[in-house]
Amino acid sequence: MKITKVETIKYALQPNILWVRIHTDNGLIGLGETYYLPKATEAIVHDMIADFLLDQSPFDVERLWDNVFSWANFFGYAGAEMRALSAVDIALWDLTGQATGQPIYNLIGGKSRDRIRIYNTCVNAGPYHDQDDFIERPGELAKSLLSQGITALKIWPWDRFAPQLKGGIPMGPAGWSAVGPSGNYITPEDLEAGLQSVKKIRDTVGNKIDILIEGHSRWDLNCAVRIARALEPYDILWMEDMIKPDSPADLARLASETRIPHCISERLFTRYAYREVLERGAAHIIMPDLIWTGGITEGHKIAILADTFHLPIAPHDCTGLVTLFANLHLCAAMTNAMILETVRGFYQGWYSEVYTDGIAVDQGFAEFPTKPGLGTRLREDVLQGSNVSMQVSTKR
């Protein structure tokens, strides 16, 4: 089996997503996905990576990964290069699974469990206004999730008080953005206002639901410590990316000066960045994003690395369904998988409009796919639609 064509697909209705499909001479097609700046990532796929893939065996995942990474590392890898490689890697694993008739988790160790607990990241999507609700109606939000069997939620009640970017950056429902420069002061009033979301959840449902706090790296170290200490009485499962994850030493200081577990970080690229965080004792939960950090190949290594420090992984996902399926395969195989990120407005919403197979969620747990390979495809009617544009590389 040889690779004959590398194809990228952009979809106007989800403008941050880039899909990669890898075709072979026996008719199999592997599907991968990444997120953010799809034009830049598409250029990397065709201008650099395709030449490494064409006429090669898709089974040689490790060799192909290392060849691409070694070339990208020559001039700087941690950006569009890794997003492109991540999507390609997932597509190669999809092909390997299809060719062998096995779901991917059977090729990386087999199942260590039968299902994985999920949490809901509270964005506005589909029929839900979860992002509005964690500010305006947090208690009702918690009850709504519990009614569906979901026992953990992630919110970011302090982002709105951090400095906001203006000009071209999408703003949140209250006129605030989840990206911007780090805040270096938070007023007592704002600290208390953010805390109200947590207090109202606890007042309404008690400890029936786990609360996760997203920081989006919006604060400096001092503000992050203040927020963490204010949260300490409320049994928080974790705080995530309260400061930028670029300095393991500063992350270690945050972890040592507060009592809440810290989750680090979807923004780190490859096992080398996680190694520094782990060696510094700078995290309690490791959060790889498989479509940014190197795909299933690298995610598997990061999970093993975390396990050597007796720490769990909790893969990141607030993007597309291919990402979620890749996460499911990793969580199935890894004994240290803790919990999986989902968005109910996505898997009950637009996913079914684009992909052939969705995830099965029951009482707050996701079931693992059973089909060979990844377990989902792009719908043919989507591929034939006017909202899709494609670029193809073949052997010259």
Image: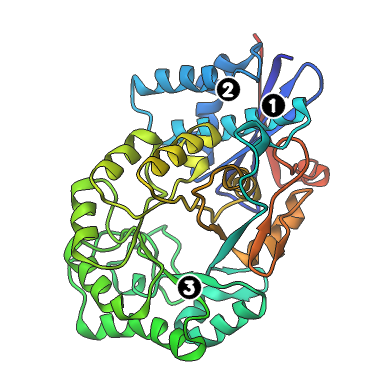
The structure's colour scheme is rainbow
Q: Nearer the viewer, residue 38 or 35?
A: 35
Q: Which residue is located at x 75 percent, y 57 percent?
A: 352
Q: Evaluate if marks 2 and 3 touch, with contact meaning CB atoms under 8 Å apart.
A: no
Judging by the rendered image, the residue that carries numbered circle 3 is 210
Marking on residue 240? none
Marking on residue 61? 2
Query: In this rendering, is residue 44 above or below 383?
Result: above
Q: Nearer the viewer, residue 311 or 396?
A: 311
CA gap, disc 2 and disc 3: 38 Å
Q: Which residue is located at x 28 percent, y 85 percent?
A: 192
Q: Which residue is located at x 21 percent, y 61 percent?
A: 220
Q: Secondary structure at mark 3?
A: strand
Say few, some or many: other residues with alpha carbon within 10 Å of mark 1 (under 14 / 14 to 19 / 20 or more). many
> Residue 117: x and y, percent?
59, 61
Q: Amino acid at mark 1?
A: Thr
Marking on residue 96? 1
Q: Amino acid at mark 2?
A: Val
| Residue 249 relative to residue 52: left or right | left
Q: Amino acid at mark 3?
A: Asp
Q: Nearer the viewer, residue 235 or 2?
A: 235
Q: Which badge, 2 or 1, is on the more N-terminal residue?
A: 2
Quadrant the C terminus occupies: top right
| Residue 320 relative to residue 361: left or right | left
Query: In this rendering, is residue 260 above or below 105?
Result: below
Q: Which of labels 2 and 3 is toward the front? A: 3
